[in-house]
Amino acid sequence: MIKGTFFCIDAHTCGNPVRLVTSGHPDLKGKTMSEKRLDFMQNHDWIRQGLMFEPRGHDMMSGAFLYPPCSDNADASILFIETSGCLPMCGHGTIGTITAAIENGLLTPKTEPIDGRNTLTIDVPNGQLSVEYQQEAAKITSVKIFNVASYLAHRDVILDIPNLGTLKVDVSYGGNFYVIVEPQENFPGIDQWNASQIIHWSVIVRDIAEKTLTCVHPEDPSVNGISHVLWTGCPKTAGSDAANAVFYGEKAIDRSPCGTGTSARMAQLFTKGQLKLGDTFIHESFIGSQFIGKIEQVITLNSDNGDIPAIMPSIEGRAHVFGKNCITIDDDDPYTFGFVV
Ligand code: PYC
């Protein structure tokens, strides 16, 4: 028997997939996207599993549902679904969702353009985003997200990694918590490692960092835990300031420069005095695609342990829609909820 039928628009942001699900939305309990995300994870996660994992998805698959706004001032809300779970925020996912939704008439801004800039306000599980986009005829040619406050959570932590040696890492928040590893004695840089090495060591580094360090968002404790590892190295695309390989889920390396990862990296570099207010930061992905990051504002976050210096970053990139599809999830299918090899 068919459990669910889902129309989807498939797109990619700088190479990383975004599957915008346009029908089959479960009714979610809660007033905020944070509460709705928890309800989805507790009661409807089979939809994510069925649509993201093989055979309907793959290791890197990532997607979203567009919901009506939760706040009075917002145009819409986004729930992110990924192989790694329901992220509180996803940068490449937002860029792809906005592009696919506007190009297909699923989202129209409430407000008129300001000074020629098209703007949107979007509720996401960990806060609210302002979004600006550029349009040429029917195509969205750029989406700029003003992301949530980002900050360095732990600095210069030594992790002992069996069979690799010690690594000095930082942990930074840009919508998700990232372990950031820069080139050093036991890590030569992403340009010297292949994808299998990055995936192999990421699983171990994330696990050890998660057991060693506490990461809880000061304003929303439901946002917690280290989900990603961001490895750095020499860029290869002209104009890039830095390069990364972002690991997520069990086997994925982000094909995009990763919006929340770029925000986390800018917060780390800002706190360590290597970027300042107003700086742009062109970040390159593992496949050489680019996002433009910028430090838009500097703020202070209040936590029980004192004030935390933080930045309000923006990330700009482009997505391309390449297909539409109707996916069914059937009880009789031996892989109703997908599988991970
Ligand atoms: O762009 O924020 C991002 C992201 C998170 C995981 C994959 N991409």
Image (cartoon, rainbow, N blue to C red):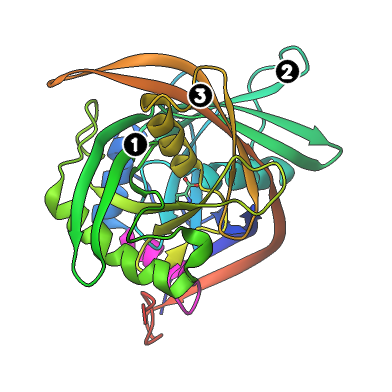
User: For disc 1, does the CB lie below 8 Å from ligand 1?
Assistant: no
Q: Amino acid at mark 3?
A: Ala
Residue drawn 64% across and 67% down?
Answer: 325
In space, the residues marked 1 and 3 are separated at their CA atoms by 24 Å
Residue at disc 1, secondary structure: strand
Say few, some or many: other residues with alpha carbon within 10 Å of mark 1 (under 14 / 14 to 19 / 20 or more). many
Q: Amino acid at mark 1?
A: Tyr
Residue that label 1 marks:
173
Side of 339 relative to 240 (left or right): left
Q: Is residue 52 magenta?
A: yes
Q: Which mark is residue 113?
A: 2
**Residue 150: percent from left, percent from top:** 38, 29
- Magenta span: 45-59
Q: Amino acid at mark 2?
A: Pro
In space, the residues marked 2 and 3 are separated at their CA atoms by 15 Å
Q: Which mark is residue 74?
A: 3
* Outermost residue to the right: 137
Residue 159 position (above or below residue 316): below
